[in-house]
Amino acid sequence: MEIGKAIELLYGKLSEERRTGELLVLPSNFYATIQENINSGSTEEIKDNYNKLLNNLKTKRIQKLLIYLAYGRQPPKPIPLEEEALFVDIKRLLEKKEPMQGVHIRISADVPEIITSNGNKLGPYKKNEIITVQDDADIQFILKNNIGETTN
């Protein structure tokens, strides 16, 4: 693709993105193709202008991706691979649960290493040792079997 046509295409896509609240469909290799075109024999001035257009387009599209995430919507298909990866990564971060604080338990007696009913290994522990347990089943196991008691 000729440089002039590539810049025209990029400008057109940016204009379309600005006109709509929806994320426009773009080929999965869009950014790679655009970058190849600009790297093929352009002057520095053309590259600078091209990169400004490209960065403006990326910024607008990332804003829209964040809005899609905020409202629990899936983006249209296809979108560039880089945007798809970004969407998935941010979604994964947002879905992470807050780490459990755990329950503090004071051990009642010296305890060798034990395996709980769900297969977790606990111990060995010393009498009066205070431990933090995250797993609800392990907490119930320790309390039910009088291995320890919760502390405040």
Image: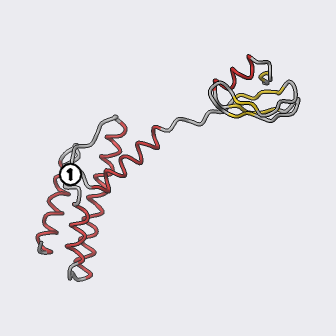
Q: Position of residue 143 (x, y in %)?
A: 75, 19
The answer to whether 120 is drawn above or below residue 48 in the figure is above
Q: Residue at x 26, y 58 (%)?
A: 57
Q: Residue at x 45, y 40 (%)?
A: 94
- In the structure shown, which secondary structural element does the residue marked by tag 1 occupy? helix
The answer to whether 102 is drawn above or below residue 76 in the figure is above
Residue 10 figure quarter: bottom left
Count residues near mark 1 (Cα–Cα under 10 Å), then give few for <14, some for 14-19, many for 20+. some
Residue placed under numbered mark 1 in the picture? 17
Q: Nearer the viewer, residue 75 or 10?
A: 75
Q: Residue at x 28, y 53 (%)?
A: 60
The three-letter amino acid code for the residue at tag 1 is Glu
Q: Nearer the viewer, residue 78 or 47?
A: 78
Q: Position of residue 110 (x, y in %)?
A: 87, 30
- In the visual, does 69 lie left or right of 9? right
* Quadrant (top left, top right, bottom left, bottom right) of the C terminus: top right
Q: Residue at x 30, y 36 (%)?
A: 73
Q: Nearer the viewer, residue 93 or 133?
A: 133
Q: Nearer the viewer, residue 147 or 55?
A: 147
Q: Position of residue 103 (x, y in %)?
A: 71, 28
Q: Position of residue 108 (x, y in %)?
A: 85, 24
